[in-house]
Structure formats: C-alpha cells, structure tokens
Amino acid sequence: MKNLYLIGFMGAGKSTIAWTLAKKCPAKRIEMDQLIEEQQGMAIKDIFAAHGENYFRDLETELLRSFSESTGYVVSCGGGSVLRDENAALMKENGCIVFLRATPETIYERVKDSTNRPILNGNMNVEYIRELMEKRRPRYEAVADICVDTDGKDVENISEEILKAVENRA
Ligand code: S3P
C-alpha cells in the first residue's frame, strides 16, 4: 500500500480515524502535528507565536518530504497542510488523499476546548469555523481522491467506508 493521507478541517476526526485505519491495515501512523511538536520541542501554538505561521508551514512541507519516498503510512495531516501546492503534490505522488468532512457545528463541539489551535485563537465560534471551512472546502475537495462525510457515523463505519473506497480505486 502507498500512503493514506487524511485531510480536512481541524476537528474533522483525522487523528482518531488514523489510529483505527493504522490498526486495520495494518500500517504505521504519522500524526503530523505531534511529530512537529516533538521535533521542535514546542507546542504548535508556541511555534506560531515565536516564529509565525509561515515557519510552521515550512515545517509541514519538510516533514511531508521526509517520508515521501516511504510507503505504508496512514498520515493524519494538519488541517492547513494541504493548502500549499507543493504539499498537495507530495501527497498525490505518494498515496491517496482522503478528505474527512464534518459540519461546522460538529467541528465546534470537538475543538471548542482546544487551546493549541492558533488559527482559531480568539475566534472559537461556529460562525468563524463555518467561514474558514467554506474558504478551504474547494481546496480540500480539489485535491482529495476520496471524500467521506463523517457526521452521525462512528469511527468503525467511517474507517470501513474509507477502506472500501480505497479498494475500489485500486
Ligand atoms: C491547522 C490545523 C492544526 C495545526 C495547526 C494549523 C490549520 O492541525 O496543524 O494548528 O491551519 O488548519 P489539526 O487539523 O490536526 O487540528
């Protein structure tokens, strides 16, 4: 298997689904945010505060490049990582991109208590999430090989749906 890249808005369930998929496949799991935090020895919010968003985006590109030749990974991607053409190209070349969709209300419920998502700092409300999601949605949809609606479904169903869709593409 090549790599599976899970993309989508913050709180779409990428990390949770990546855990389950990695067990089912089986595959190795990569959590981009977590790896970047480990490599930098800093929380995402502190990287943004100290160096700015562009620096963080460079780290995402570097990380994606570092395992782009490897296979057998399920990658939980940072919600903004696919916005750069270079990153989307790296994902496309090396695997299948799965877009996890959820409504702004669902997203809000999942992220409302998070203090480590600087993009939502000071804007933790459904309206802001809806607006940013609408801005990003065309991009997510354009790069995705597979789109999966997650509202009202459990992790098991979502994971099986993804695996079936991947098989059907093969
Ligand atoms: C971001 C999403 C976050 C993290 C960073 C920026 C974004 O990842 O990479 O805070 O721009 O959407 P999650 O999608 O895992 O929360």
Image (cartoon, rainbow, N blue to C red):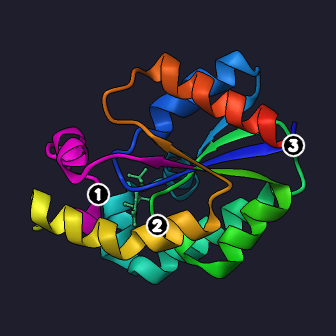
| C-alpha span from label 2 to label 3 | 22 Å
Which quarter of the figure is the N terminus placed in? Answer: top right
Say whether residue 81 is visible: no
Which quarter of the figure is the C terminus placed in? Answer: top right
* Residue 79 in the image, given as x and y percentages of width and height: 45, 59
Identify the residue under disc 3. Answer: 71
Q: Is residue 103 magenta?
A: yes
Q: Nearer the viewer, residue 123 or 56?
A: 123
Occupied quadrant, residue 163: top right
Q: Is mark 2 within 8 Å of ligand 1?
A: yes
Q: Nearer the viewer, residue 52 or 20?
A: 20
| Dot 2 amino acid type | Gly
Identify the residue under disc 1. Answer: 117
* Residue 63 in the image, given as x and y percentages of width and height: 68, 61
State which region is magenta. Answer: 99-121
| C-alpha span from label 3 to label 1 | 29 Å
Position of 155 compared to 109: left or right?
Answer: right
Quadrant of ligand 1 in image: bottom left
Q: Are marks 3 and 1 in contact (CB under 8 Å)?
A: no
| Dot 3 amino acid type | Thr
Q: In the image, what residue occupies the spot 22% across and 72% down?
A: 131
Identify the residue under disc 2. Answer: 80
Q: Specify the farthest residue to the front.
A: 168
10 relative to 137, above or below:
above
